[in-house]
Amino acid sequence: MKQIAFMFSGQGSQYVGMSKDLYEQFDSVKQIFNQAETITGYPLKDIIFHEDKRLHETKYTQVCMFTLYQAILSILNKYQIDAKYSLGLSLGEYGAYLHNQVFDFETGLKIVRERALLMDKASNNHPGKMSAIMGFDIALLEKIIKDSHSLVTIANYNTPGQIVISGESHSVDAINELVKNAGAKRVIELNTSGAFHSSLMSDASIGLSNYLKEIKLNEPQKQLFINLTGKAYESNIKDVMTKQITHSVKFYQMIENLIDEGVDTFIEVGPKRTLCNFVKRINRQVKTLNIENIESLINTLNDLEVKHEIIS
């Protein structure tokens, strides 16, 4: 019997038209999109399904992605597919909270909307950048950053061979040059709207903490693995949520720990197959599946030997 973990895609994987065929196929997806538009007042279908620059603006992107998580979870529920474990990359962790019933969809959507607005404001007030560093020793990178005494941090431990740094633009540029000269295989500046998972997001972290004070959240109902530690959640969900904004995303550590738990199948919930590709670089022995459209849904259902009558 397969040991499954759901993993939720992060911000940056969105694209125009994502999930449109799922919307056309499933009434539950239509209902979720309509509900999200009512709650937020955002024209989500226009933003997602048509060429619209708002899809790539943080304050809209995060709401669009979270709505998609709920839509795909509704389809998984229809086919009685569930997972004992869940995780997400950055924003994707909110999909894992949703799966763990930390909040219902409406509450989660309102939190994500507030988080997105706070992060957008912090990005405007404290601009910075992010870059991906590939093929470089992690311990040496950590030392270079520490010795620089700059406002740069490791934002994402995606795989042992791909690390993302974040911080003040000129400081990120300086670290990029240092690691290039020290033998990094590739350094790629990322097209992001802010220096996420760095101290430049402190205002957003404080703002979210204040927003969450009056909101009741539940303890996770399943096995939730979190960005902050790379391990299973232990306690204080609000603290986890607020710290996540300024701290590193320990993605490959979560995957390695889940494999140690016996997980052999990872299903990516969300657009593209970015997380599936990361997992394959971490461990090629495990199976990776994804759901973002009808084709990938059919492939996943077939692989899991779930009966369906979907015609692509």
Image: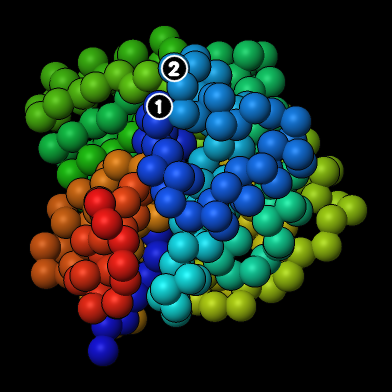
Quadrant in which the N terminus appears: bottom left
Name the residue nearer the viewer: 112 or 125: 112
Instruction: Pick whichever, 219 or 205, lies toward us.
Output: 219
Q: Secondary structure at mark 2?
A: loop
Which is more N-terminal, label 2 or label 1? 1
Do the residues bearing badges 1 and 2 touch, measured as CB atoms within 8 Å?
A: yes
Quadrant housing residue 46: top right
Q: Residue at x 49, y 17 (%)?
A: 52
Quadrant of residue 206 within the rendered picture = top right
Residue in view at x 55 percent, y 37 percent: 64
Where 300 sits versus 12, above or below? Answer: below
**Label 1, label 2: how many angstroms apart (C-alpha)?**
6 Å
Query: What label does residue 51 carry, if any?
Result: 2
Between 255 and 110, the one nearer to me in the picture: 110
Q: Amino acid at mark 2?
A: Glu
Q: Position of residue 260 (x, y in %)?
A: 28, 78
Q: Quadrant of residue 256?
A: bottom left
Residue kind at label 1, given as amino acid type: Val
Q: Residue at x 50, y 76 (%)?
A: 223
Horizontal side of 158 relative to 245 (left or right) equals left
Q: Residue furthest right?
A: 214
Q: Percent x, y for residue 13?
A: 37, 36
Q: Residues within 10 Å of mark 2 (few under 14, many from 20)?
A: few
User: Residue at the location (18% across, 34% down)?
Assistant: 134
Q: Crowding near pointer 1: few (<14 within 10 Å), some, many (20+)? A: some
Residue 301 visible in the current orientation? yes
Q: Where residue 262 sits in the image (x, y, percent)?
A: 28, 82
Which residue is denoted by mark 1 in the rendering?
A: 16
